[in-house]
């Protein structure tokens, strides 16, 4: 026989994970629509990249990929330890650090593009690059706020709230995957 | 077996906590109801202005015309006309129907009908409402911008909706308002889906849920999946307008590179077709329940009804191309979309037949909710059948963008949903506000509305069939349309009749809430679903003890009943011989 407290926390876990599935489907559809549009533009274009376009920088987006990957890794590390009751501070701080570094790297990307004469209105490809990265960074900012929201949990006396950690982590990893897709489809191929 | 202990909110004491920042799903439902009724009034007034222009071109709009359009002496100018039909469509779809059917009745009915104390995430629910308010304020604010509100149609196709077609901030604010409202609706959807999955009362399987809940649940699922698609579309539209990207600009409109205006149409209708089901599914569910309740017999084939609604939900995601037959799509695609569209007839016919089966040999009580439900059966039948001509490529090429389309979608989206919404208001009024609306005036309201509504929308289909195009400021400059002037006058008179009938409702509604003395009984309609097991109006905690469900929602007219009632509550064991 389970105690009432166990039943309650079981319920919270279930409700949260269902809601989180819905949330991820929603944001997934948002980005899927963007990728669909990109596919249409690219497949129907006569020349790609549009004529007169200089080569895109590859180094900065590659660095961004590494940063967001490291951030996800440390958050995963924090999450697995937190779930067994260990409040490891360093992985969380590191994850936040790399997350902020990723956002900074996007600003570097934009200024590099501008210095090459590639502006949002230059052509359809630059429109895609800027709009996708803007929207992604917008979500990253929300997710970083989510990470800050985890900070109170690592205080010594704070009670364990694994749900919150799991949900924020899911969203964070989701954005990592979206970036990975953007990196490959926009900058690599 | 232990169940999750649902918390009870503390009883609200201050005005602020009771009516403004309430977490209570019933209060949020009422807030959405007032919000929707307000916008229904605004959108309705716009409709009357549109109709006035089409019946009496060049004549000043009566009473308020001079105050609204002083430069033209009260005549509605052409550019304002374009704003009016754009804002009418936007307001009615996103700010009137959605809040009333999904916001108000979704919030009010879901926890009560599944036996829960509140939504799974009350805070999210409250934020969802206030976000909708922010969006509404932005939309109304856009009416007062220097170049006026959005005027590219509710579909806001580029290039009409780009800076080339509509300079000024109106269209930008429109896009922003829609984006924010989309966020609000998806927040609601998260809540609805989770609540229905996790908080059903012990013993309530999915097929023990009232069909109202089925409709709302499927709607929420469609909302969660497809609103983000529209969100992405309007976001890119905003970028085009504000940051100079070139997604939807092509040809001479683009300074460089090449976007694709038609892509927006794809994105819009990938969302837009499911949207029509988002709007109609709650009404279908409500009507399916009410027909059974007032025929005093179980809903015929309730499981099949639920499953056909689910099938339609799935099919609705695959047919959007039927809105774009005239965009030079490949014939292979148009035929595919046509065939897929036609397959929707199969589940639709099943649940429509089930409605008739429910009525067959029932002991029908012609109460006001029942009259409105029967009205839905009629207008939806008509609206659904005329859809076949628009889903067929050959006929659509002629009918596309005519008033036939306008008449068709008003029958399905406006008439059905409006009548379904009124059925819901009359039916749940005692549980929401603790008062019954006057049955007599409800019936007067119904019959006048029904006459006016059919005059408007059937008339529209007729002038459309005669070749009258949508969105023309003055169609009678074309000689062949001159014969249609009397018909258009008839439509306009019908519209004014229908508008006047709503005043009966307003008086009835306001009187019942604020002035009526006698309280409604706990179960005035003699129905067995869970919300009727508790006092009227529902207390803030809903159920003091979470009910245990033992039978389905439509156990009426069972010959084995010996309790002196002809129905049984869902908390009672099914009576068998
Ligand atoms: Cu459609």
Image: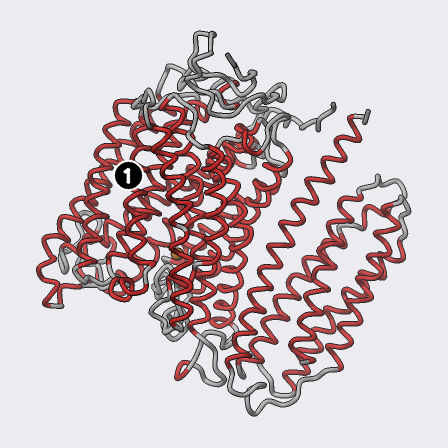
Task: Report x, y in % for residue B139.
Answer: 42, 55
Q: Residue at x 38, y 75 (%)?
A: B164
Q: Quadrant of the N terminus of chain B?
A: top right
Q: Nearer the viewer, residue B250 or B198?
A: B198
State the image quarter where residue A114 is shown.
bottom right
Q: Where in the figure is residue A76, as x and y percent of width and height?
A: 83, 56
Mark 1 vs ligand 1: CB below 8 Å: no
Which residue is most to the bottom?
A52
Residue neighbourhood size for the residue with mark 1, other residues' Cα within 10 Å, grouped as few (<14), some (14–19), many (≥20):
some
Residue placed at 83% from the left, 41% from the top? A160
What is the quadrant of residue B198 in the picture?
top right
Residue B225 at x, y percent in the picture: 55, 53
> Please, which residue is most extreme toward the front here?
B577
Left/right of residue A75 with respect to residue B292 in the rendered view: right
- Tell me the colour scheme of the image: secondary structure
Which residue is more in the foreground, B416 or B148?
Answer: B416
User: Disc 1: which chain?
Assistant: B
Helix, strand or loop at mark 1: helix
* Image vertical order of residue B494 relative to residue B290, above or below: below
Residue B341 lies, with reference to residue A135, above or below; the image says: above
The image quadrant where one finds ligand 1 is bottom left
- Residue at mark 1: B378
Q: Nearer the viewer, residue A43 or B17?
A: A43
Q: Is residue B70 above or below residue A63?
A: above
Q: Residue at x 58, y 21 (%)?
A: B550
Percent position of residue B278, x then y? 45, 47
Counting labels gives: 1
B330 to the left or right of A183: left
């Amino acid at each position: 026989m389970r105690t009432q407290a166990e039943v309650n926390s079981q319920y919270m876990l279930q409700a949260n994970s269902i809601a989180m599935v819905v949330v991820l489907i929603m944001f997934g559809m948002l980005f899927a629509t963007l990728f669909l549009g990109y596919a249409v533009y690219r497949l129907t274009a006569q020349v790609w990249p549009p004529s007169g376009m200089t080569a895109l920088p590859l180094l900065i987006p590659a660095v961004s990929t590494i940063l967001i990957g490291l951030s996800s890794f440390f958050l995963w590390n924090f999450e697995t330890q937190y779930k067994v009751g260990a409040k490891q501070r360093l992985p969380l701080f590191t994850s936040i650090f790399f997350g902020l570094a990723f956002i900074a790297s996007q600003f570097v990307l934009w200024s590099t593009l501008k210095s090459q004469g590639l502006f949002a209105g230059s052509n359809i490809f630059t429109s895609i690059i800027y709009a996708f990265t803007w929207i992604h960074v917008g979500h990253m900012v929300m997710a970083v706020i989510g990470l800050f929201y985890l900070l109170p949990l690592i205080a010594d006396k704070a009670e364990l709230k694994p749900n919150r950690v799991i949900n924020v982590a899911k969203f964070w990893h989701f954005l990592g995957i979206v970036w990975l897709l953007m990196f490959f489809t926009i900058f690599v191929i | 077996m232990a169940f999750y202990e649902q918390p009870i909110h503390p009883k609200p004491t201050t005005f602020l906590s009771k009516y403004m920042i309430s977490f209570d799903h019933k209060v949020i439902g009422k807030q959405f109801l007032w919000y929707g009724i307000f916008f229904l009034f605004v959108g309705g007034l716009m409709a009357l202005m549109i109709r006035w222009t089409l019946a009496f071109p060049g004549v000043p709009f009566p009473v308020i015309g001079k105050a609204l359009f002083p430069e033209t002496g009260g005549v509605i100018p052409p550019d304002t006309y374009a704003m009016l039909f754009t804002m009418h469509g936007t307001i009615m779809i996103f700010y009137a129907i959605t809040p009333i059917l999904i916001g108000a009745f979704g919030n009010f009915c879901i926890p009560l009908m599944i036996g829960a104390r509140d939504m799974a995430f009350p805070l999210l629910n409250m934020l969802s409402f206030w976000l909708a308010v922010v969006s509404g304020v932005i939309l109304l604010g856009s009416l007062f911008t220097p170049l006026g509100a959005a005027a590219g149609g509710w579909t806001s196709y580029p290039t009409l909706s780009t800076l080339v077609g509509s300079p000024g901030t109106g269209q930008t604010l429109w896009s922003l308002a829609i984006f924010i409202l989309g966020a609000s609706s998806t927040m609601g959807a998260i809540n609805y889906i989770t609540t229905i999955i996790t908080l059903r009362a012990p013993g309530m399987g999915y097929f023990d849920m009232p069909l109202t809940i089925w409709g709302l649940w499927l709607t929420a699922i469609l909302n969660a999946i497809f609103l983000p698609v529209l969100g992405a579309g309007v976001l890119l539209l905003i970028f085009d307008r504000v940051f100079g990207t070139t997604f939807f600009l092509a040809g001479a409109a683009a300074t460089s590179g090449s976007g694709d205006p038609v892509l927006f149409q794809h994105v819009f209708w990938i969302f837009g077709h499911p949207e029509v089901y988002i709007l109609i599914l709650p009404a279908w569910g409500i009507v399916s329940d009410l027909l059974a309740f007032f025929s005093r017999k179980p809903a015929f084939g309730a499981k099949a009804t639920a499953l056909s609604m689910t099938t339609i939900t799935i099919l609705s995601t695959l047919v959007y191309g039927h809105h774009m037959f005239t965009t030079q799509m490949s014939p292979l695609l148009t035929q595919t979309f046509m065939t897929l569209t036609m397959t929707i007839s199969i589940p639709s016919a099943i649940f429509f037949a089930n409605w008739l089966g429910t009525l067959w040999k029932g002991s029908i009580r012609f109460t006001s909710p029942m009259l409105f439900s029967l009205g839905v059966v009629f207008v939806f039948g008509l609206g659904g059948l005329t859809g076949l001509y628009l889903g067929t490529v050959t006929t659509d090429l002629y009918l596309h963008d005519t008033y036939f389309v306008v008449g068709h979608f008003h029958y399905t989206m406006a008439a059905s949903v409006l009548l379904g919404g009124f059925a819901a208001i009359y039916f749940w009024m005692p549980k929401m506000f603790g008062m019954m609306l006057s049955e007599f005036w409800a019936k007067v309201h119904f019959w006048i509305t029904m006459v006016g509504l059919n005059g408007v929308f059937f008339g529209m289909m007729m002038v459309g069939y005669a070749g009258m195009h949508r969105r023309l400021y003055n169609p009678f400059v074309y000689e062949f349309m001159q014969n249609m002037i009397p018909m258009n006058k008839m439509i306009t008179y019908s519209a004014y009749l229908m508008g006047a009938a709503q005043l009966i409702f307003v008086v009835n509604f306001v009187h019942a809430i604020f002035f009526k003395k006698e309280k409604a009984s706990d179960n005035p309609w003699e129905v067995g679903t869970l919300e009727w097991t508790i006092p009227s109006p529902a207390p803030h905690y809903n159920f003091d003890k979470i009910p245990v469900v033992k039978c389905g929602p439509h156990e009426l007219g069972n010959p084995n009943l010996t309790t002196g009632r002809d129905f049984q509550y869902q908390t009672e064991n099914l009576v068998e011989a």
